[in-house]
Structures are given as structure tokens and as C-alpha cells.
Amino acid sequence: MSPTLPADSIFQALSAAADYDPNYLPVERARALVRELVRPVADEEQLFIRTALGRVLSRDVISPMDVPPHDNSAMDGYALRHAELAPEGETRMRIAGIAYAGRPYTGSVAAGECVRIMTGAVMPAGLDTVAVQERVKLDGDVAVIPAVAKAGQNRRRAGEDLRAGAPALTAGKLLRPADVGLLASLGIVEVKVKRRLRVAVLSTGDELASLGSAAAAGQIYDSNRYTLDAMLRRLGCEVLDFGVARDRPDDLEAAFSSAARAADAVITSGGVSVGEADFVRELMARLGEVAFWKIAMKPGRPMAFGRIGDAMLFGLPGNPVAVMITFYVFVRDALLSMMGQHPLPEQPMLRLPCSVALRKNPGRSEYQRGVMYRENGGWKVRPTGGQGSGILRSMSEANCLIVLEHERGNVEPGDEVSVMVMEGLV
Ligand code: AMP
Ligand code: MG
């Protein structure tokens, strides 16, 4: 697919993909389509670097200075002129003074003299090399220094990490603790970041009771809205809670329309499979441009993706486990893209031996809830007990997903499988 898709029509874009088959979409194909069809938010704001943690830079940050700002010592030792050392054997040098980190030695250093120097201290003018203190013997105010192979040893050059005028961090970077520290090290107080993404969350179903109200006979508590809210907050999104919409067209329409007006993205759960009481599909298709995908995956087969007004729509299945897995597999990347992150980091996959046999038919991707554990000094993975897509406890027990790729068949005990670590996904 070309990068210059007609952005004004999702359906046009979807059908432009030659191999688009809405009834049987491989996971990787669906992921690629989602990634291509979302756009980053344009609005930016200026934030104090502490507050900017987890936000995405909207501009390059140019270093205002050299890092380190001056030549300095990498070790505790003795700063000297390398040319004055005997090529072999020891050289005796008088100690002219001491250079501390933050308190430079400003006196002169005569020929044949050295300066005691601490890690991080500015190199005294004219000196180029540091002999480490462990190898130097003292004789009164004279240091007895062994031969040093190369000039410049244990000296860090000004600008060696970063030059003034060079980009220290580039637009699209999601700020982590190291980045906040780096910004501070440059004396930068505020940065321009993308505004927070606003994401509306909406549950559908007559059977759902909200927390705080008693579940009547035949009702279950709505859990998806809370799982989604938690995942979204960890991603750094602003969550707009649109509650539960009943399976009635007027109720659903009102909820969908107002959610789409208020948010950059709307995430619904339930009502996307073909069923009697599921008006959601019909309504989504009427209100916006929405494709209904039967994805070749388990769990999470039915999913809707598209747009209502200016908001991207993710219609996730109703089953609680399927909600989480479709979120990890499709929604997370899309939201990170909309937040402005680029390039999108590839989610690392481990390869671990699976301790038990797993049944798997080629032709769809499967995501099993897994537990990574240590045994005899090595790591292994096993599936959690119940794997039903309604069993949220399996998700809670799991610390990883076992990813059985599209073409993969059965797994025998000891076979390696792909494993996605869950911590860090959100
Ligand atoms: P649906 O896709 O609407 O047919 O829902 C599939 C299954 O997921 C049904 O068992 C629903 O009761 C359940 N389900 C749907 N939405 C939620 C929700 N918000 N919280 C918990 N379970 C749900
Ligand atoms: Mg339903």
C-alpha cells in the first residue's frame, strides 16, 4: 500500500489494499492497516520536564551546550602531560595541586609537574592524560607514575556525548526517565509535547451492571470499562468514561455520537459479533466509515475499525480477555501513533521453551495467557489454567502472552515459543 492513501475515506483506503479480505484478515495485515490509517494529533503544549514524563516530544530538542561542557577526568588519579612521561619505567612528578569536581585547579603546572584530580573534575589547562591513582605511588609531594600507553587516557572530551547545536532528542520520542534526566543535564526546563490523547470508553450490553449498583438477576458487572480505563491511563491517555449503552438503537446512537465528538478515539466493547441484540455493528456503519473485521486470531476474532466524524473507532469484542488482547495487538500501537510517537518501537519477543504441549491449528494467530518462570537456572513458560476468553483471572495470573504465530502448528513439551512480556505493554 502506498503511503499516500486517500486519508478522507477509510473504506477507500481499506479497499485499496489488494489483499484486503474483511472475512479473514491475518493479524499482521490488520495491524499494518491500523497503523497506516491513524494520524498523530497536531496540538502541542509546553510542559515542565517533570510533568512531561510519558508524553511525546512534538519538536526536536537541540542541545544548547556541549556535553560534557569541558574536558574532564574519567577517574580519580593524576593529570599530566603525556609527552613528559618516560616511555618505559616510572616518572617522578611533583604534585602542583588538586582539582576537585566542581572546584577546578586554576594554578599553573610547571614542566615535570602533575595535578591530583578527582572524577569529573575539569582537566587543568595544558594537561591531557590521567594516570589512575591505584597505579601511582606517593613519595611526599611527588607522584611516582608508571608508563601510560596512550595520550588522552582517562580524559573525557568536551562535547564527546553531545555537541552544542545537535539534536539531543528528536520529535516523536516518548519521554522516559532517562530522557527527563538528559533534558535536565542540558539545563532545559520546559519542552514542547503533543497534547494528551482523549479516548472515550463505552461498554455495550443489556446484561451489564455498573459498579455501585447491584447486579440484578442475569446481570454481570461491567469489567471491560475498568480494564480499558486502566490500560489507557498507563499509556498516558485522558480517559472519557461514557458508561454503558444498552442494546437499544437510540441509546447507542446518542452515546456513540457524543463520544465521537468529545474524543480523538472511541473504544467500545461488545456487540460486534453478529447476533440478535447487537445493533452496534449496524449503528457504527451508519454513523461513520467502519470496517468489520473477522481477524484470523484467537481470542478476539470480530473487531470493528474505522472512523466516526474525526474520531477513530475501535470496536472490540465483548469478552474480557479478548478486549485486553485486541487492545495490546491493535489499539496500543494505534494510540501511540496518534500520541505522536515515531518510530513505533517493535514489541520485543522472547523465545522460551514451553513446558507443556499446546494444541494449535495453522491459519490463525493465538494468544495464550502464560506464566514465565525460572527452573534450574533457566526460564520457561507454561500456559495459565483456564484459557477461556471470558476468564479474566487468567489474564491476572499471567505475566506474559504466548504468541503462536499464524502458520504455527501444535507445540510439543520443550518446543520454543514466542513470548511477549506483559509488564511494559501498558
Ligand atoms: P458480545 O460481544 O456483546 O456478544 O459479548 C460477548 C461476551 O462478553 C458476553 O458474555 C458478554 O456478557 C461479555 N461482555 C460484554 N461486555 C462486557 C463488559 N463490559 N464487561 C464484562 N463482560 C462483558
Ligand atoms: Mg453484547
Image (spheres, rainbow, N blue to C red):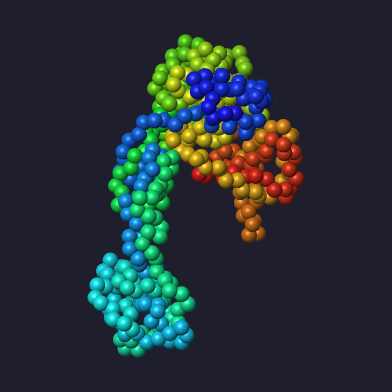
**The N terminus, quarter of image:** top right
Nearer to the camera, 131 or 262: 131
Residue 316 appears left or right of 159? right
Q: Position of residue 204 (x, y in %)?
A: 51, 20
Q: Position of residue 162 (x, y in %)?
A: 39, 55
Q: Residue furthest top?
A: 250
Give the quadrant of residue 82. Answer: bottom left
In the depicted structure, whether residue 106 falls above or below residue 386: below
Give the quadrant of residue 104. Answer: bottom left
Nearer to the camera, 381 or 257: 257
Residue 177 appears left or right of 140? right
The residue positioned 42% from the left and 37% from the top of the image is 236
Q: Position of residue 90 (x, y in %)?
A: 43, 87
The residue positioned 35% from the left and 67% from the top of the image is 72
Residue 142 appears left or right of 354? left
The residue positioned 31% from the left and 88% from the top of the image is 140
Residue 191 appears left or right of 373? left
The residue positioned 56% from the left and 16% from the top of the image is 281
Whether residue 326 is visible, yes or no, is: no
Whether residue 73 is visible, yes or no, is: yes
Give the quadrant of residue 3. Answer: top right
Nearer to the camera, 356 or 190: 190
Q: Residue furthest left?
A: 107
Q: Position of residue 418 (x, y in %)?
A: 65, 44
Q: How many marks?
A: 0
